[in-house]
Image (cartoon, rainbow, N blue to C red):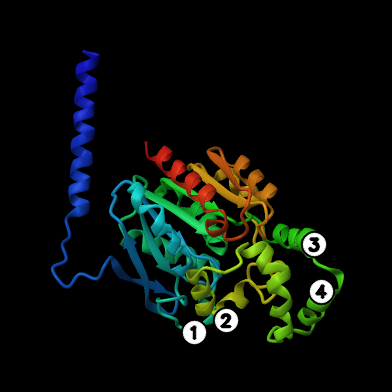
Amino acid sequence: MFLIITLQACNLNYSVKEKSTSSYFNNPDSGVQVGGVKLITINTPKGPFKVWTKRMGNNPTMRVLLLHGGPGGTHDAFECFENFLPKENIEFIYYDQLASGNSDNPNDTSLYDLPRFVEELEQVRIALNLDKDNFYLLGHSWGGILAMQYALKYQDHIKGLIISDMMASCPAYGQYANDVLAKQMPPAVLDTIRRIEKAGDFQNPKYMELLIPHFYSKHIIRLKEWPDPVNRMFRKLNYELYVSMQGPSEFGVAGKLANWDVSKALKNIQVPCLVIGATFDTMDPKYMEWMSQQMPKGEFLLCPNGSHFCYYDDQKTYFNGLIKFIKKVNQ
């Protein structure tokens, strides 16, 4: 009797899955195919705008939506995912947030607001038919802030959450930047950087001249030559959006996100979550490990050779861990 019931259940699950898969691959569009690109109309307090998405691969049960950093960055930096996820039959979706990359830019600073970005993300989720049976949300850096804030409101729609290289508290990040990262610089270099920042002279060529060897090459990407996708992302960065929310300094957050802190709310995130940190990251890896312990289904992955873009400078660790997590949750 038990065997019969089990077989009936398996057959039922198979038919449901088969139906779901059939529906997923049924493309109602009859026009010109555009390689997975989908422009999604989102509603905002200032009217409708379009944001750009692009699907890579096809898998109705493992679909990863990527939230880029910044704020004001672009999907470009994620292009290395193409070398790892498709061969594991994991679908992922590029997404340029409003005022970033290929999406509309209203040039309206009133729209640079975390709760509004959360609602934008929910509209994107609905338009892409992502749900609790297939939706993995991966946020890197600022994208991690957006992912955490979204999960605290809409986690019922998420199958798995990945927080990549982001702490749950901007004040804690600022403290780590000042107490740990800044002190790793030669005193004379740090003094010059501090003087430039205090004067607000961020366009001073000396500023980047010092930051690149003493900060970026140690804590952003630890590669002699930066990958083209990352360079493209930085060239396209919406600096107005970045400064408005992050602030102009690389040491902590001074914009609209300065007081953002959800560390005490992490316990409310009930979905499986992977927190990824790196030894040389701009974010405190010990804090990120602590974050994973606050969530009932949290896990931590450390990239021992990586920095803030550890999916470039410690790729084997990053992608092995990410793929293992997604497949485990998908079972």
Disc number lying in front (1 or 3): 3
Do residues under tags 1 and 2 come within 8 Å of each other at their CB atoms? yes
Disc number lying in front (2 or 3): 3
The quadrant of the image that shows the N terminus is top left
Q: Amino acid at mark 2?
A: Glu
**Image point 39% across, 52% down: which residue?**
85
Query: Where does label 1 land, which residue?
Result: 107
User: Dot 4, how many residues are within 10 Å of its Cα: few (below 14), some (14-19), or many (20+)?
Assistant: some
**Image point 78% across, 65% down: which residue?**
182
Q: Amino acid at mark 1?
A: Asn
Q: Where in the figure is residue 62, as x and y percent of width and height?
A: 35, 48
Query: Where does label 3 land, which residue?
Result: 184
User: Dot 1, how many residues are within 10 Å of its Cα: few (below 14), some (14-19), or many (20+)?
Assistant: few
Say whether disc 1 or disc 3 marks the residue closer to the N-terminus.
Answer: 1
Query: Where does label 4 land, which residue?
Result: 189
Query: Where does label 2 land, which residue?
Result: 240
Q: Where in the figure is residue 108, as x and y percent of width and height?
A: 50, 83
**Is residue 69 visible to us here?**
yes
**Image point 53% across, 45% down: which residue?**
274
Q: Amino acid at mark 3?
A: Gln
The kind of secondary structure element at disc 2 is helix
**C-alpha separation, residue under disc 1 versus residue under disc 4:** 35 Å
Q: Where in the figure is residue 83, as x and y percent of width and height?
A: 40, 57
Say whether disc 4 or disc 2 marks the residue closer to the N-terminus.
Answer: 4
Q: Amino acid at mark 4?
A: Val
The kind of secondary structure element at disc 4 is helix
**Is residue 131 visible to us here?**
no
